[in-house]
Amino acid sequence: MGKNVIFTLFTILYLFIYVVASFNSSADEYALLVYKSKITSDPNKILVKNWSQGTSFCNWIGITCGTKHQRVRGLNLANMGGTIAKEIGGLSFLRSLIISENNFYGFIPDEMGKLS
Ligand SMILES: *[C@@H]1O[C@H](CO)[C@@H](O)[C@H](O)[C@H]1NC(C)=O
Ligand SMILES: *[C@@H]1O[C@H](CO)[C@@H](O)[C@H](O)[C@H]1NC(C)=O
């Protein structure tokens, strides 16, 4: 019984640490994944094929990170459609946003106004 309890506690602790760590790994990754989830048209399948969790988002196509910090500085995502996730406002280091040739619909989220 003792072994099972310890094993169970260890598993729960491990999962807890894992969840906390992945949840917190980056506010930017979260924002990007929400952005991805709202894209319904991506003819070149960039997001599906390349934006894969478990790889650093700084290596994802269309993302430029700052040199000092692993934070998103630029987004270059042309030719996509869907809606624009308000979470994009969470990319607090974003300086450049290129979303040309898109077919977005709906509203431009207010949160985009917070971006510098
Ligand atoms: C979460 O990440 C931030 C930086 O992104 C860090 O400052 C903070 O300590 C982290 N929190 C936890 C609970 O690890
Ligand atoms: C995404 O694309 C970049 C640049 O082409 C490449 O280095 C990276 O390995 C790709 N990642 C995945 C998961 O395909």
Image (cartoon, rainbow, N blue to C red):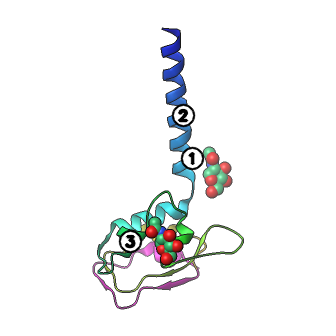
Q: Nearer the viewer, mark 2 or mark 1?
A: 2
For disc 3, the marked residue is 47
Disc marking residue 21: 1
> What amino acid does circle 1 point to?
Ala
> What amino acid does circle 2 point to?
Tyr
Task: Evaluate if marks 2 and 1 touch, with contact meaning CB atoms under 8 Å apart.
Answer: no
Q: Would the CB of label 1 be found within 8 Å of ligand 1? A: yes
As drawn, the residue found furthest toward the right would be 68
Mark 3 is surrounded, within 10 Å at the Cα level, by few (under 14), some (14 to 19) or many (20 or more) other residues, namely many
Say whether disc 2 or disc 1 marks the residue closer to the N-terminus: 2
At a point 72% along the width and 71% down the height, the residue shown is: 68
Disc marking residue 88: none
Mark 1 is surrounded, within 10 Å at the Cα level, by few (under 14), some (14 to 19) or many (20 or more) other residues, namely few
| Residue 20 in picture, x, y percent from top left | 54, 43
Q: Which residues are magenta?
A: 95-116
Lateral position of residue 102 relative to residue 3, left or right: left
Lateral position of residue 18 relative to residue 86, left or right: right
The CA distance from mark 3 to mark 2 is: 30 Å
As drawn, the residue found furthest toward the top would be 1
Say whether disc 1 or disc 3 marks the residue closer to the N-terminus: 1
For disc 2, the marked residue is 14
At a point 57% along the width and 54% down the height, the residue shown is: 25
| Residue 85 in picture, x, y percent from top left | 38, 70
Q: Nearer the viewer, mark 1 or mark 3?
A: 3
Label 2 residue SS:
helix
Whether residue 85 is visible, yes or no, is no
Residue 99 found in image quarter: bottom left
Label 3 residue SS:
helix
